[in-house]
Amino acid sequence: MGTKQFKAESKRLLEMMINSIYTHKEIFLRELISNASDAIDKLYFKSLTDTSIGLNKDDFEINIEVDKEKRILTISDNGIGMTKDELENNLGTIAKSGSLAFKNDNNLDGDVDIIGQFGVGFYSAFMVAKKVTVVSKAYGEDKAHIWKSSGVSGYTIDEYDSDMKAGTVITLEIKENTDEENYDEFLEQYRIQSLVKKYSDYIRFPIKMEMERTEYPEKKEGEDKEPEPITVKEIVTLNSMVPIWKKNKSELKDEDYNSFYTDKFADYEAPITHIHSKNEGIATYDALLFIPSKAPFDYYTKNYKKGLQLYSSGVMIMDCCEDLLPDYFNFVKGLVDSQDLSLNISREMLQHDRQVKIIAKNIEKSIKNELSKMLKNKREDYEKFFKAFGLNLKFGIYQSYGMAKDTLQDLLLFKSSFEGKMVTLDEYVSRMKDDQKYIYYACGESEARIDMLPQTEAVKDKGYEILYFTDDVDEFTIKMIMNYKEKEFKSISASDLDLTTDEEKEEVKKKTEDSKGMFDYMKEALGDKVSEVRLSSKLKTHPVCLSSDGQVSIEMEKVLNSMPQNGDNKVKSEKALEINASHPIYDKLTSLYDSDKDKLKIYAELLYNQALLIEGMSIENPLEFSNQICDLMV
């Protein structure tokens, strides 16, 4: 029979598909194996009602053969096969899916999964093959037929003399290597084995291939030479067939899940926990998720890729589907298997449809519930998790401008002045004193530095608990939460800390009025370094501190100015210099205002620099600061 031409539309689609639709050429094997699995499924479905077929499920298999010398790769199955018309319709017209038609015609439910519903997967073979030959014999037919094509040039279909039983044999003549592409890899048995494992491990029929291995016999007693190595050939089943997530939870132990995780996700340490869920309804899918014990080495770099593996009826479609995980849960590893997802013709890109959003929302809820359960019942494990990934939860609230706070705020932990333990916001609020208005927090490089802050003393003296914010993002996160259970957050460095009694306030107010001229002079001496110099109502034994008057706190100024992208555009917080009226330094300042205003100016600069150092900030002129101290000492 002469060569037939593909229709113009099919020809253009074939050219486009070969050159652009598929990102990785290796997926051709996934497509051909999926087609073979579909063909077996169809005959298996028939066998359930037609006993004359004489086959049971264990009789079906897919075979792969490699001939490196002839550059031939063969994939065969003993499925339902194709008639001449089906070869014409299914292979001669691109995007005509025989599997989809079969599924629709037979009103199949979930008992028989038909993978190939898109009609173009077969043509991915031309990405690696210069010629493709298909020999097929349909079940119940007397004769086989052969379909040949070298790509866009067209195809032929002829009768084929063969005593083969029902099934299909696809033969690929693999292309020669080029400067850009290495096609030899698709003739290596271990490469084929790894591709089957990667994409088709859970095809439910055995995928078999003859493998060669070398054995080294032991040297026998009395022999002079080492015995020659022996090449052994054996038929190996390449796939597992039954995915772990399809099994009942009652069949599985933690060891089974842990072994699957460490093998599948290349982690030598078992996960902290796993989530195994089966969902039916608007979105039907299986999910198997893992929360790792530690962050991978590239977790906080641009190279890290979030996402879950995506399977369709046991066939891996995407290695890293980002749409199924929110950024704040990007540490979760695992997979989702659904036969209902809308996939485009390449099976590599997920459409942004309602089902995807439903699955993603369900997964988010499952992760949140599992973490909440761990926090409640396995606190030690949760604190280990939070040490590895807690920063990401905080960033989740900040980067979503607070939209994710309802999901994440109850999962946060902060070190606390209460017994030096990690606490939740709920635990903090549950211990608040009756007269306590705010959730108090303090920022610093470490707990030790925070404890040295002058303001800490007054808050602790009142018996109030303090949350220690030692991560750069902490205060930004809290600003997005705004309040928790109707309790506002208050930095101990805020100007309106309000810890004093009415009597103490009145005393400070009187001294402030008496000292107005002196404070105005000190403010003038310091210029725009501070917004105000005033008496403090929050200091106990320390002489001086800085307070934040605006929305940008002192800690936020430090964090923002440390970021390289800010360059010379420095952020400046509105700082007030506060003096302790009960400290001897106040009397000294008052005396200098009356007797030596030049020295008072030096004192103002010294106290300001001292307050900066206490806050962990650098001073503008360390040399001048040192000289001023020396002058006073002399």
Image (cartoon, rainbow, N blue to C red):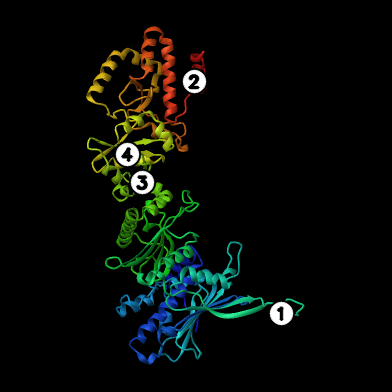
C-alpha gap between disc 3 and disc 1 = 66 Å
Is the residue 95 above or below the residue 141 in the image?
above
C-alpha gap between disc 4 and disc 1 = 77 Å
Q: Is residue 382 left or right of residue 207?
A: left
Q: Which tag is nearer the camera, tag 4 or tag 3?
A: 3
Earlier residue among tags 4 and 1: 1
Earlier residue among tags 3 and 1: 1
Q: Which tag is nearer the camera, tag 3 or tag 2?
A: 3
Q: What residue is rendered at 47% in x and 25% in y?
A: 619
Point out the residue furthest to the top here.
Answer: 595
At label 4, the amino acid type is Lys
Q: Which mark is residue 413?
A: 3
Q: Which mark is residue 625?
A: 2
* Residue 534 found in image quarter: top left
Badge 3 marks a residue whose secondary structure is loop
Q: In the image, residue 66 lies at what x, y percent?
A: 57, 77
At label 3, the amino acid type is Leu
C-alpha gap between disc 2 and disc 4 = 35 Å
Q: Are marks 3 and 2 in contact (CB under 8 Å)?
A: no
Q: In the image, residue 230 lies at what x, y percent?
A: 66, 79
At label 2, the amino acid type is Phe
Q: Which tag is nearer the camera, tag 4 or tag 1?
A: 1
Tag 4 residue: 479
Q: In the image, residue 486 lies at what x, y percent?
A: 23, 41
Earlier residue among tags 2 and 1: 1
Badge 1 marks a residue whose secondary structure is loop
Instruction: Classify 10 Å Cα crowding around label 4: few (below 14), some (14-19), many (20 and above).
Output: some
Tag 1 residue: 220
* Residue 291 found in image quarter: bottom left
Q: Which tag is nearer the camera, tag 2 or tag 1?
A: 1
Is the residue 28 above or below the residue 222 in the image?
above
At label 1, the amino acid type is Lys
